[in-house]
Image (cartoon, grey):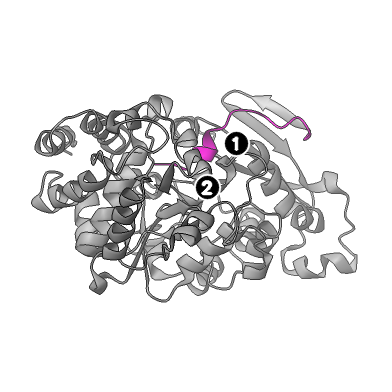
Amino acid sequence: MTTPARRRATIAASLPLLLLAGGCSYLSGESQGADPQSADCDAYEQWQGHDGTTVSIYASIRDQEAELLEESWSEFSSCTGIDIAYEGSGEFEAQIQVKVDGGNAPDLAFFPQPGLLARFAQSGDAIALPESVRANAESGWSEDWLNYATVDGELYGTPLGANVKSFVWYSPGLFSDNGYATPTTWDELIEISDAMVEDGIKPWCAGIESGDATGWPATDWVENIMLREHGPEVYDQWVDHEIPFDDPAVAEALDRVDSILRNPDYVNGGHGEVQSIATTSFQDAGTPILDRQCGMYLMGSFYAAQWPEGTTVAEDGDVYAFNLPPIQEEHGTPVLGGGEFIGAFADRPEVVAVQEYLSTVEYANSRASLGSWFSAHRDLDLDLLEAPTDRLGAETLRDSEAVFRFDGSDMMPASVGAGTFWRGMTNWINGDETEETLAYIEESWPSS
């Protein structure tokens, strides 16, 4: 599912802003006051000549993250004379369609769901990348990433930020004190889990409560196991419904999830029995690691922001993370994740200029230097990533053995990926049988 951090509703009061229906709009650009003729603007010379123009951007990114976005392109905006009018909305997925249908499409949009961008490409509303932007994208990102923004052989988007959804959070101190080594294979992961049980520690904590989105963390478990157990080709077939949701491969993956999440010896450290997973929020679920009430927690890289104030997130700190190990060696290093893709609804010169800049490593480095963000760009300067888990995420994505796949539920029809899949997994945690759960989700798949 879309990164939960995108759902925060508090608006940072420190920025000048104009409240609009469904979101917030931040004003930047010429207000920054940089002199386009100064040496500071030399790096933007190729995009100058657009004084007095405005480019609108619409996305789901709000609050502090939106502030950092504004800061990341403020110098570009000042030096080029292009005012970037940014609007972030918690209702992005629904409102972008309303805007397009109403003839009020933004110039650019940041899509957290590749399928949504593809829908606009197929309808003829989104515009394929200009050659200059395509060249930047092809040199900057792997084929795995670009495939998600490719429709009928045309590239319609460039990747922006990224997150890793296969992190296992743990306490380095607990591991060190008990002689547990960070696992590199699935068998080692289970060996550590069993050792924790023998040492009187519940090896796993979990929580899938998330308001109207309750259930999504359990879908991450299934997606991670599908990718690791059956490989990227079968994973893609499952996500695209080329095999049914109740295929034996999916049942096998869910049975493996069952061996952890519905194993009373393994869960739910610090919270209760198995069924407490359904009522424990994903935000609170990992915190018992700090008190050594549980050993590990599967949750995305964005969870770094959820630890209590004062928690040291580092390899030798209070908490850190490792990528969920592979199950079958022939599938390389599976990495489940997400991110945003920049799509365009206009091709005016100033819009193309902004597209070009946002597709460069210089922009990626600008945003990375502000913290709380990383990218899958091949040339991102990792030394700019001060947060250890940001660097770990970027290094994981850059691994030559990495096999990246996008969050499956974000790729499925919304009625399934953000509907029956979530509900089915919640009911499964509460006791529904695997066969019953998978049949329920399969029956809900749209016929066309």
Q: Position of residue 387 (x, y in %)?
A: 63, 57
Q: Quadrant of residue 430?
A: top left
* Residue type (three-letter) at the residue carrying disc 2: Phe
Outermost residue toward the front? 199
- The magenta stretch spans which residues? 1-15
Q: Quadrant of residue 41?
A: bottom right
Q: Which residue is mark 1?
A: 88
Q: Residue at x 34, y 58 (%)?
A: 192
Q: Nearer the viewer, residue 13 or 353?
A: 13
Q: Residue at x 70, y 42 (%)?
A: 67
The answer to whether residue 162 of the structure is visible from this angle is no
Q: Nearer the viewer, residue 147 or 427?
A: 427
Q: Is residue 256 magenta?
A: no
Q: Position of residue 253 (x, y in %)?
A: 19, 51
Q: Residue at x 53, y 44 (%)?
A: 290
Identify the main secondary structure in magenta. loop
- Is disc 1 placed on a helix, strand or loop? strand
Q: Is residue 10 magenta?
A: yes
* Residue type (three-letter) at the residue carrying disc 1: Gly
Q: Nearer the viewer, residue 424 or 106?
A: 424
For residue 302, the mark is 2
